[in-house]
Image (cartoon, rainbow, N blue to C red):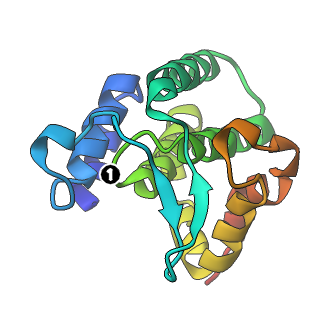
Amino acid sequence: MYDTYLFAQHNKLTPKTLEQAQAQLTKHILQKPQQGKFRTGDMFVVTKNGKIEYVAAVPDKVKTEMKKLYADMETLLATDLSFEEIFFFASLLHLVFVKIHPFEDGNGRTSRLLEKWFLAQKLGNNAWFVQSERNYYNQHQTYYGNIRRLGPEYDELKYSEALLFLQMLPNAINYKG
């Protein structure tokens, strides 16, 4: 993971570099042909007891949904945003990415990297020191609970329920855990 964050610190955030970073993040998890490539099969997030908790975007929609997310990301990177807007959109990119769940594995790691990378592109290198990952890790039940609030099916997500999730990143600025 350390090497991937170094890669991100030395490269601009683009669709290609994000996919390269995902390949690095999953080099010990996925087979080479799956690294940095969108999934082609159905994706379910399952609880420890085998219950389906979330049904991600169907494979036919992954490329289209990611194309929209990448277009939004590129627009946001090229737009002057206030400090508050930067945190809002970094969190929203993270949430939308993790809900699409475009890869076979490593979606959570990649979405958290995307969030931090976006912050750093907009705010400068000091953004890499924001303790968001530690905050999410130490509050993992709250983190996943806030993600679940949007609903269990990709096509029926209620982004009106995203506020608690979107507040977690700005709260990481004051995180002392």
Q: Is residue 137 above or below residue 155?
A: below
Amino acid at pointer 1: Tyr
Along the line of sight, the residue nearer the viewer: 133 or 125: 133
Residue 96 position by quadrant: top right
For the point 64% across and 47% down, which residue is it? Answer: 95
The x, y position of residue 94, in whole percent, is 59, 45
Do we see residue 168 in this rendering? no
- Quadrant where the C terminus is found in the figure: bottom right
The x, y position of residue 105, in whole percent, is 34, 54
Do we see residue 64 in this rendering? yes
**Badge 1: residue crowd in 10 Å (few <14, some 14–19, many ≥20):** some
For the point 65% across and 42% down, which residue is it? Answer: 154
**In the image: residue 160, left or right of residue 8:** right
The x, y position of residue 161, in whole percent, is 85, 51
Q: In this figure, which residue is indicated by the disc labeled 1?
A: 5
Along the line of sight, the residue nearer the viewer: 60 or 110: 60
- Quadrant where the N terminus is found in the figure: bottom left
For the point 59% across and 45% down, which residue is it? Answer: 99
Residue reaching furthest right? 160
Q: Is residue 78 above or below residue 83?
A: above
**In the image: residue 70, left or right of residue 21:** right
